[in-house]
Amino acid sequence: MNSYGTLFRITLYGESHQPAIGVIIDGMPAGITIDHRLIDQDMKKRQPGAIGTTPRKEADEVNILSGVFNGKSTGSPIHLMIENTNIKSQDYEHLKHHPRPGHADFVASKKYHGFHDYRGGGRFSGRLTAAIVAAGAVAKMVIPFKLSHELVQLGTLTDMTKIDEYLLNIAEQKDSVGGIIEVKALGLPVGLGEPFFQKLDAEIAKMMFSIPSVKGVEFGLGFRGIDFMGSQTNDLIIDQEGRTKTNHSGGVTGGISNGNELVFRVMIKPTSSIGKGQETYDFSEGKVTELLIGGRHDVAIARRAGIVLENALAIVLADQYLILQAYK
């Protein structure tokens, strides 16, 4: 429901326009140095400011309310809280009867019988990913792996040196575009993951699909593997350490890390809230009418989603790493 993990477990709370959002981390080993500067660095990577990102700017200051003493984890739950200070809830009043296409407005109203907080997307908002970034920054302090991410495509654009020009054009059209982000982890040992219901790639995919706007995840060659034969896609083992000639599997074999670099790509859909008028059903009018969406939204949410995916991966790897240590 609102929690993820076995030994490194997070519980996410809050909504977009409530006073605060946050996360509680349970299972953090005692004695780990908690460097607040590293948390702040990752939080800044998620913030808007570049062309094509939302005008809504939050300070995103992470308050550590428990579980840390004298700069070290105590072994008790760590509570990370982030205040929401830049809120304009009036922009969302009409969504009670005129739900936005592509958003969770309609399904949320049905599932929660109208009691949900619809402001800014409420519980479904990308605002909650700030807490994921904070938790992931702490998770990185547990794992001895090097994580990275790279935006490799934005809409039809593959030349990332032309992002600003491309997004200005999309913004003029009052529209949005999606993107593809490649995420990597270097230094994984052989053995993370299980053969069936806790496969490493399945756990990662589950976490990635928990992030708003994610619509696709592929490992290694992914769907491109359809163009090759088995003799071309097999990763040939070339030494007694299990090192392979290629890494078409993306670092996971049989659901278990194989010692190669972990490589996967995530497709982020175009932002659903756009400036263009859209003809969609109005429940108060009982007919299809034009919907004009207010609020402040990204032309390309993928432009600042990379750190979210990277830190979400860190949460999965921290859990899997502690499980592996427990087995040992």
Image: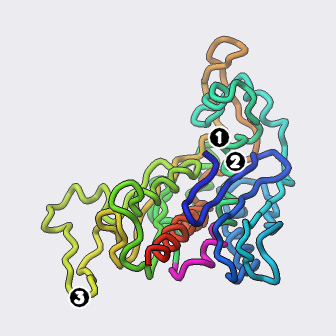
Q: How much space separates mark 3 and mark 1, taking CA atoms?
A: 53 Å
In primary-sequence order, the first of circles 1 and 2 is: 1
What range is drawn magenta here? 136-146
What's the residue at 34%, 56% (across, down)?
196
Magenta span contains residue 33: no
The three-letter amino acid code for the residue at tag 3 is Gln
Which mark identifies residue 240? 3
**Could you say whether the residue bearing mark 3 is in a helix, strand or loop?**
loop
What's the residue at 80%, 30% (across, down)?
93
Disc 2 versus disc 3: nearer the observer: 3
Mark 1 is surrounded, within 10 Å at the Cα level, by few (under 14), some (14 to 19) or many (20 or more) other residues, namely: many
Quadrant of the rendered image containing residue 231: bottom left
Residue 199 percent coordinates (x, y): 38, 60
In primary-sequence order, the first of circles 2 and 3 is: 3
In the image, 313 versus 286, the foreground residue is 313
Residue 167 percent coordinates (x, y): 59, 56
